[in-house]
Amino acid sequence: MLRTTARTTLAFLALTATTTIASAQSDYPNKPIRIIVGLAAGAINDVQARVVAAKLAERVKQPVVVENRTGAGGNIAAEFVARAAPDGYTLLMTPTATMAINPAVYTKLPYKSPDDFVAITQLSTYPLFLAVQQDLPVKNVKELLAHAKANPTKANLASPATFFDMVTALLTLDTGVKFEVIRFKSTPETMTALITGQAMIAFQEYRSLAPQLKAGKAKALATLSTTRSADLPDVPTIVEAGYGHAAAQPFSGIVAPAKTPPAIVKKLETEINAVLNSPDVKERWKSLGLFSVESSSEAFGKLIVSEIKRWKDVATKANIKLD
């Protein structure tokens, strides 16, 4: 009789727990959501997170707060989210570096990608432009490489993050021309280094490059995307320049801690994609030089896995390790 009572009690507790979890999922969200960003305020990923947060809050009728946790190349933010409760209230705004490149170049990370996360959806992708100082005596990528080879002590590249280091490695692997990487804290600093002659090259997003092109202080020799940018249609792709293996296009997306319930993942995927498909967000992406994408949890998850493989191959070939 005692055993029967114990079994009944355990069954009741299990049913109660299951009912509570199901109720929490059906009521989701019923409190503020946090989007953690591993970059400083004003960075392109931070800007995207804030646009999405504001529009998502309108849809789910709960505050959506952006929180910057900077440092260690995005690893601090990623670790924080990986260890957060898998309840849909702590999300990570992630760039390519956090999800795909850091696992390729660090042998020890405080998180494991993709295992510690579940993909929600990709937000965008965007072109990077190979930019040089206006006075540099080159008109295209081929001339730039020849100039760098003839002036090896001046062949350097300003980089604000690991992604740019890896793109530099790609360029070297594809062309054989080596560039010294000079580290800076932000993209605006790399642009300053470029136009003041401290650096020969800087990979720049459209938003930071456009004012300098207009002012005649820099020139874009190529986009690293496989298709030309509508913002700078006269700038050829790196493929058209003859160095297709150096093509690279960073992504931005949202992930949640692993084991986040599928119903919550689907809810977030649906709501965030609705935000991304709204005309005003599409227009905002266009003004930032971002490419809109059609994505899903499954598609973004597959992209992360394929990008990890690609950058591990690059890191191995270029012998790049950061710890």
Image: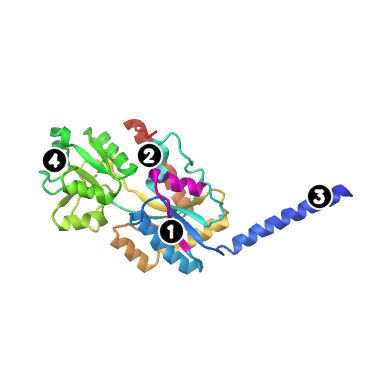
Region in magenta = 64-82
Judging from the image, what secondary structure is the residue with disc 1 in?
A: strand
Q: Say which residue appears at 43% left-offset and 66% top-offset.
A: 55
Q: Secondary structure at mark 4?
A: helix
> Which amino acid does the dot numbered 2 rest on?
Arg
Q: CA distance from mark 3 to mark 1?
A: 46 Å
Query: Is residue 204 in view?
Result: no
Q: Residue type at mark 1: give it.
A: Val
Say which mark, if any, is on residue 310: 2
1 or 2: tag closer to the N-terminus: 1
Residue at label 1?
Answer: 66
**Label annotation for residue 143:** 4
The disc label shown at residue 7, or none: 3
Name the secondary structure under disc 2.
helix
Q: Amino acid at mark 4?
A: Glu
Cα separation between marks 4 and 1:
44 Å
Magenta span contains residue 72: yes
For disc 4, the neighbor class at 10 Å (few under 14, some 14 to 19, many from 20) is few
